[in-house]
Image (tube, rainbow, N blue to C red):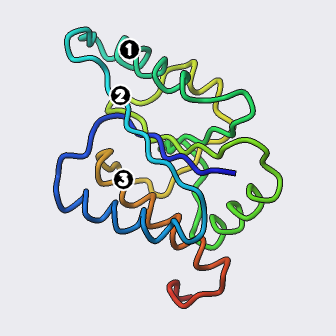
């Protein structure tokens, strides 16, 4: 199983790029990881929020295979702590036959089609984060989950 972290928009802040690279390297010791950044064509980007969600949804769904397990990071998702997240990851490693795709949505959320395709919705917080910051948070939590599973001294109870 490969873990894919799919996000809309590019990372343009150097300190976040550095943090993302840091955790991407650390995670390479535990799992196959792919980071995908999707962006709408600036010249063809719709103006209305709903149309933007639909266009972004098409980009997302084009990257999701039939056997992939799609997880949306969504404020209406199941709230989960780090220990539970590590156990959830372990279960997916055992039973999931396709890729495990975590998706960070755009500014206006996900389209109805993406919600319909999703296998699971997860929330790390009731707070709202920008997609650049959340990408770093998601990678850190993935790293934390793997260190918990390996009983390594990163996470403190």
The residue that disc 1 covers is 50
Query: Can you tell which mark lies on residue 154?
Result: none
Quadrant assignment, res 23:
bottom left
Label 1 vs 2, first from the N-terminus: 1
> Which residue is painted at 60% across and 42% down in the image?
71
Say which residue label 2 marks: 108
Residue shown at 34% from the left, 48% from the top: 128
The picture places residue 17, in percent across and down from the top left corner, at: 25, 57
**Residue 67 as seen in the image, left or right of residue 50:** right
Query: Marks 3 and 2, how far apart in space?
Result: 15 Å
Residue topped by disc 3: 134
On the rendered image, what quadrant is the C terminus found in? Answer: bottom right
For marks 3 and 2, the one nearer the N-term is: 2
- The residues bearing labels 1 and 3 have C-alpha atoms spaced at a distance of 22 Å
Relative to 43, say whether 133 is above or below: below
Direction right: furthest residue? 95
- Does the CB distance between marks 1 and 2 fall below 8 Å? yes
Position of residue 142 measured from the top left corner of the image (x, y, whole percent): 53, 64
The residue tagged with tag 3: helix, strand or loop? helix
Count neighbours of disc 1 (C-alpha within 10 A) and say few if under 14, some if 14 to 19, many if 20 or more. some
- Count the labels in the image: 3
Going 38% across and 52% down the picture, which residue do you hit?
A: 135
Tell whether 40 sits left or right of 114.
left
Mark 1 to mark 2 CA distance (whole Å): 8 Å
């Amino acid at each position: 199983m490969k873990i894919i972290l799919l996000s809309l928009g590019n990372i343009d802040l150097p300190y976040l790029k550095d943090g993302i690279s840091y955790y991407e390297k650390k995670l390479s010791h535990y799992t196959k990881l792919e980071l995908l950044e999707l962006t709408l064509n600036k010249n063809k980007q719709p103006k209305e929020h709903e149309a933007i969600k639909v266009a972004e949804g098409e980009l997302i769904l084009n990257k999701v295979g039939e056997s992939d397990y799609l997880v949306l990071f969504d404020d209406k998702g199941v709230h989960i702590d780090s220990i539970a997240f590590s156990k959830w990851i372990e279960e997916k490693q055992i039973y999931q036959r396709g890729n495990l795709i975590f998706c960070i949505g755009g500014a206006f959320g996900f389209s109805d089609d993406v919600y319909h395709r999703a296998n699971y919705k997860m929330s790390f917080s009731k707070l709202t984060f920008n997609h650049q910051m959340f990408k770093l948070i998601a990678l850190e939590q993935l790293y934390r989950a793997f260190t918990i599973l390996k009983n390594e001294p990163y996470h403190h109870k």
